[in-house]
Amino acid sequence: MSEESLIEEKEKKLEDIRKEAEEKACLVQRALYYVEEFLAGPMCGRCYPCSLGTYEARIRLIRISQHLENVNESDIKALKRIGSKMMEGSFCKKGKDTGKFIIETLTSSEEEINQHLSGICPKKECINLIEYVINPELCIMCGKCLETCKYDAIIGEKREPYLSGYLPFEIRQKRCTRCGECIKVCPAEAIEVITTKIEELVSSK
Amino acid sequence: MEKLIKLQIDGREVQVPEGMNIIDAAELAEIHIPNLCYLKGMKGIGACRLCLVEIEGMKAPVIACNTKAKDGMVVNTKTDKVQEIRKFVVDLILSMHPLDCMTCTKAGVCNLQKYAYDFELKESSFTRKRMGYPTDEANPFIKRDPEYCILCGRCVRVCKEQGTNVLAFMGRGVGAKVITANDKPLQESECTFCGSCLDACPVNALLEADRWRKGREWEYERINSVCLLCGNGCDIIVSTKDGSVQKISAGAPKGSAERYICAYGRFGFDSIEAETRLTSPMKRVNSELKETTWEDALSIVADKLKKAGKGAGFISIAGIENEDAITLKKLAKDVVKTKNFDTTMSLYAESDSLKNSQTADINKADLIVLVGLNPSQWERILPALDASVRRRVDRGAKLVVINSSDTKIGEAATINIIGNETSILKRIAKALIGKGLKADKKLEASVKDVELSEEIEKAATFIAEAKEPVLLSSPSLFDASANIALMKGKIITVGLESNAHGVALMGLTTEGKTYKEMVSDGMKVLYAVGEVPLNKRPDTDFLIVQNSHLTELAKQADVVLPSATFLESAGTIIDYMGRLKYLPKVIEPQGESKSHRDIFIHLAKIMGATIKRPAEAEVKKASKVETKLIFSPFTKKEGLDISPNEIIESVNASVINGSRLLWLKEAEKAVAV
């Protein structure tokens, strides 16, 4: 809802939200996207199970995806309860469909969701659980990532072809926001996404 | 007679009128279906989803508030599925509600607390949500606390239905808030402080501003009474504790269009203990009023009345109870032997128009015709009538407003006819005759040469096709309007004071000088009962004022007698719809004040006569008058033009000046500028 756009944005339809959500690989991100878009648009806010339920569902999904303190199975149980009660108790089809989506997403792979509780995002999309790392063996020190990074998170010196003694670039994890722009411009495909918890050996590719 | 159907709820068989929704039907079977957003009398909106019930034969649960009961239905209100959903919803609501039952003023009567108890929810299993909205306590009447709001929407819908339309929702979902236009404090909106929202709110989000530390709801004794401040005579429930009034709320049954009490009635009770309250008789000694005993004061009065005899005059307000009116008439006519006794009713009505007024139930009326009336909640002229009419229109009735000038209620009318009222009534009568309604020969003759217009034809069609039309008329236009009622419908006169009808039926109408004459001509002895609308002492040798508060007039009197307010004296009135209403004695009279009839009886005793306390049978007999409507020419009675505002404000001046309503007058003056 920006003040600059004077044209009223048309409310997204539930099918569109569903399609956009399914582009996300991680199930938690999928559910979170759906719920947030639903809250921003189609939710009318009148009946309690749907409006209060999705608000709570959003809080729980954020807790899971960002691996906040004390996240545990009760969050998943709460989400399942919200989903099923929304399906049974909502006033209109929109609420019922949202509830259905939450349940479907949560039950399509229990394993994947549970791994989030231990701090691992198998599909490597939940920002707090992943890190971007530059593979030192593949980095050609071209400097493109350094130029692109808006947050000055990459340190390194651009290599002059006629000189030697350059070290591979590194990403400063404290500044990295996992926006993904550096991965898009790296010509050597040297930047990898790893899950923080399990330390995968970057070099053994 | 409505058709009755049979259905089964939770195994109990119950018979209900056709078309009733399941929540009301269950109530008749003494089964409570949980609900938070349902308002009796209005269509269910299904927002809270607590009232979901399962009906045999239907796959999914349905909301009981908006489903009509059908013959042979089998309803189950407590299946596992719906109980789970209810528990879920209450759990969610508790997660955004401050868990404050210990000090909350609503404890004991809070629906949310009751449901949390029923579902054994100590605390919410969901994350705690707090919006941090500030409270609105800038006015001395209503406190708004959005932290406690559960977004049920009852206040918004009640305010909208009665026409004031001050509250609305801002935002959606958990962050939603009930606000006035531009989120301003209540006194900067068009709020009339009637407090209908206070009665509607199920939790502590809307409460009386002075409610804190005034005791718990279960400590209150709730007594049904009637407000006597204006011509509506609204039912009220007075909550008392330790012998003093703590709060007043609307008393008509839930779902009735008449469930209303305006700011004067609801918040004026502070005046009972105001500084201006008279607590002992006073007599004038050396041009100053000094306190004295009842025996002394009444002997002085008795002496003067005996000497004056026919030259004595009694004037009273029409807001006194029936028993007081009967006793006053006996005192004046039989003991003092004067024919001069009249009430303020004669300022705006002839007693015949009140005596011949019929009875009707506005809740059943499908067509309402207002003739010459301008009720307004904003100016507090018959505000309950304004609210009831607007509610009826919202619930499907049609409204025809006939007035010589533009009125605010005309905005809600199906047809608003502005013009000379008697001429309009004449033309409607002719149109009705044209539609085949039977009429008296004299009536037919009197409307022979009038022209009709489209508006008139339309109004006449409404009247002809209505099942239960009700005509409400100002007293001066009663005769003209009655001519329509001769053909169809019921006619009701609306007096400006609460017991105008009662006073007329009890016979307290003058047989000598009228109120106006007594005030202007000059009497030997003038005895004023109640807060008569006079500020200057009229021409009289001896003035006696019998009132509950020390008014400007009382300060100029020779003897002042303290009387009890209507909450301190048991009695009856006959309201504008012709109903006999009972007022119990809610609290003991302040100081040495006594009820009007007790003073009259005591006075009579000192004068050597006995007046017996009026029995209920006497009142009932006097009130049963055969109302016979006859044809009268289409004219408006002259001389009854006192402005309603003037009379209501002056008759209630002590109530307004002695309570927090004074703040209201000053705030309204400020906003008007």
Image: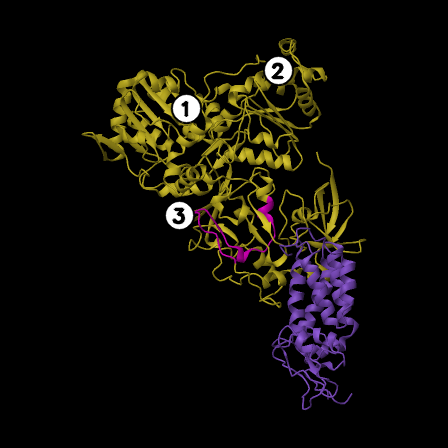
Relative horizontal placement of residue B578, taking residue B609 as reference (left or right): right
Q: Colour of chain B?
A: yellow
Under circle 2, the secondary element is helix
Q: Are marks 2 and 3 in contact (CB under 8 Å)?
A: no
- Near mark 1 (Cα within 10 A), the count class, few <14, some 14-19 or many ≥20, is many
Most foreground residue, B345 or B666:
B666
Q: Nearer the viewer, mark 2 or mark 1?
A: 2
Horizontal and vertical percent for residue B567?
Answer: 42, 39
Res B426 label: 2
Res B243 label: 3
Horizontal and vertical percent for residue B130?
Answer: 55, 63
Please tell me which of labels 2 and 1 falls first in the chain: 1
Chain containing mark 1: B
Q: CA distance from mark 2 to mark 1?
A: 32 Å
Q: Colour of chain A?
A: purple
Horizontal and vertical percent for residue B409?
Answer: 57, 31
Q: Which residues are magenta?
A: B133-157
